[in-house]
Amino acid sequence: MNRFFFLVLIIASELVFVSPGVESASTNVNIEEVTKIGAIVDANSQMGKQAITAMKIAVQNFNSDSRNHKLSLQIRDHNRDPFQAAMAAQELINNEKVKVIAGMETWEETAVVAEIASRVQVPILSFAAPAVTPLSMSRRWPYLIRMASNDSEQMKCIADLAQKYNWRRVAAIYEDNVYGGDSGKLALLSEALQNVSSSEIESRLVLPPISSISDPKEAVRGELKKVQDKQSRVFIVLQASLDMITHLFTEANTMGLVGKDSVWIVTNTVANALDSLNTTVISSMEGTLGIKSYYSDDSSPYKEFSALFRRNFTSEYPEEDHFHPSIHALRAHDSIKIITEAMGRLNYNISSPEMLLRQMLSSDFSGLSGEIRFKDGELLNADTLRIVNVVGKKYKELDFWLPNFGFSKTSSKHNVGDISSNIAAEGFTGPVIWPGNLINRNPKGWAMPSNQEPMRIGVPTRTFFEKFVVIKDDPLNGNSNDKNLRYDGFSIELFRLVVDHLNYDLPYEFVPHDGVYDDLINGVYDKTYDAAVGDLTILGNRTEYVEFTQPYAESGFSMIVPAKQEESTWMFTMPFTWEMWMVTAASFIYTMFIVWLLEHQSNPEFRGTLKDQISNILWFAFSTLFFSHRAKIKSNLTRVVVVLWLFVVFILTSSYTASLSSLLTVRRLEPNVTDIHSLKSCNLKVGCVDDSFVKKYLEEVLGFRSGNIVPFGNIEANYIQKFENNTIDSLFLERPYEKVFLNKYCKKYTAINTYRFGGLGFAFQRGSPIALDISRAILDLSENGRLKTLEEEWFKPSSECSADERYSIRPENLTLHSFWGLYIVYGATSIFCFLLFVIRLLNNSWSHQETYQGNVSAWNIAARLARCIHNRKGTINNPARVSALDLAPPALESSSSRWEYKLSPTHPPENLQVELQMHE
């Protein structure tokens, strides 16, 4: 970069005392005014030749239509050198007195020309733009107008491609510019990948400028060797000259990097020039995806221009094979139109460079390259991108990518809606030809294993339980090397089942790993193994080094403690809680009282001495519990109460019987220790496997003292021995191992206090697309039930711990909450019946008030009501009606057993009738 600033300083110093050349406007209308326009292009490249042809056509069209004003196009060749571009700008400004300079295909050329032109106030129309637009650009180079957009949208398109096909690791390739940089494209790509697809750049290949090396073939080969040992096979070419592209793809094919499951993507700096490449280079790029700037080729102006362009181009450059106008030619043509329209709005008085610049920035029209509008010196509308696919010796167009919309099957933003929403799932329009003629599936972008180089999978030899992984010598082969071992277990069988479920072949070989589990994970991380299969627990810190699949088993750990079978003399009381027993007893007494009140008046079986009445009502109430009551019920109100009570009894007895049966038939274990707090408070010893994350969790999370933790080897016999020797009081095992342990030792141990983690899964190298395919296969097997079937085959409980013999924790007692509604209905109904009975008695009492005059206070009425209910004489048979004699005032009562009456003249004896037996 020092060379660049030194160059600008020298050229700018030469122009300090040079005023801009301005041709005087002629006052004679018959004299033609000629405005000179400068063009700085690479005259030897096809891109430059097309730009020259397009600008000449635009100048010719203007000159033929204008009578008094003509344009003169002054073309200079920069020969791909920013220094020569700067010298050409100096010569055009000083000698040719140009009013505007157009051209510059690269940003390095544009920067030096803009620095010079801004000092002398000459507007610049550049065909290039920086990858990242600095905020101070409009202040630093106020006379610079950029006919292109920055690369941010293009990098987002590449990130969308990576997300679409799940490419997690990519390699970025770019040709270093003459000032030693990537123009900011690498940073844009990295940011876009992280924001859109969570992918990342795994490696960078920096190719030296082709003009600075004598042997491009060897330089390219040296860079490509850096990625041969990498797993990623997604290559993104950010920028490169066409000569460098030729060497890059030739060597990549020779080294086998353009093959099956590899992906090559080129940006618009290369894709826009695909038409310029010869058939040999194009054929070496077969399967490459390109991102081109889109333009419409079906409009009438384009068709007229294209016909004229082809005629002029083939006439002037007959040696060129391709003669169709590219996006560079269209932008060159539009640049001349921007200048002429700005001049027209000024009535061709362009003596003020500032006024000319302002008019150029206010351009608003539909050009051949698209909509022409500027904001802050840059095209306002971001480019619509077209995805192309190199096939054979040519390329075909696939779909579009629209800024803020993503992939679309149409170039119009108004028609995106439903059309573009499913492209990610459905794929592009038409088949995509991938490198290596890959068919029936999309490339993984990863160095996939082959029969010659199968995937190396590490398998732990020191497993906790052989149910998951077991490694034995193959009895069919006497050799004892690693290739003649037999691998078995639930995890191994599941992996084989998953691989068979994939839609492609996955050659692999198992490699025994004699070490702890963390070392196995590190082996995948440092690429000793391609993957790891076994009972691997998914932990947060492990995901920083490897990529886990979908969990195939629930994980966590449980506390295993010794337990004994629960026995109790009062087992029959356990079905109900004590609150339930209390409420049931209260309901029983309440029912006795209500039935006695309702039946005492009319039913002889509920009368007699106090002792007889109590014994009768108790016998009646107890007999209802067994539905064997024989006492006759006289009152309809009593029948309602008894029916509801029998319903309550039925529900209670049925629930009690079911709960008691469960308690008696299902054997229960009562743990010796109930929680972790009791372990810590009593300073008891706990055990765990030494090769496990559990020990660290016990210390750092659960707060156990390191001295109280007893680690031991992962051998099943160790667990039982530690318990029997009273070395430990509890054992912490991961959930899958707990299931295997209790399937065998269910009579002596039980599990409590479960802590959940990520689960068990398989580990792959970070960014591996195989991990996602394995995860999908695990989900498919889980959904179709094959995973459940495999679990049942491998984790069958022992005969002592079968499903019918397994011990369980005691079932919960039946609580009052479960029957609260039943009690409310019964209580409300019985109270209603009692109130109805009382109201009828009071109504009958009220009807006799006129017959007997005397003290009718509330107290006396209550006393009469109580007397009626008790009625020790037994003369009232029906409580629905009460005799006048029973409700007579006290003045008529006698202390003797006989009735005495004082007759008055108004009440003759014969009119006095007392009914001792009343009927309804």
Image (tube, rainbow, N blue to C red):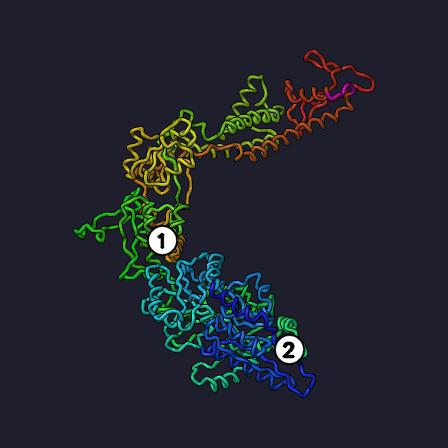
Seen from this angle, which residue lies furthest bottom?
30
Q: Position of residue 850 (x, y in %)?
A: 78, 24
Magenta segment boundaries in residue numbering: 853-858
Residue 527 is one of the magenta-drawn residues = no
Q: Is residue 523 above or below residue 735?
A: below
- Residue nearest the viewer, comparing 207 with 517: 207
Q: Give the Cα separation between the discs numbered 1 and 2.
A: 64 Å
Q: Earlier in the sequence, mark 1 or mark 2?
A: 2
- Give residue 15's position: percent from left, percent from top: 56, 71
Kind of element beneath mark 2: helix
**Residue 764 got which mark?**
1
Q: Secondary structure at mark 1?
A: strand
Q: Is residue 241 above or below residue 464?
A: below
Q: Is residue 857 magenta?
A: yes
- Going by the numbered disc 2, the residue's amino acid type is Met
Total of numbered circles in the picture? 2
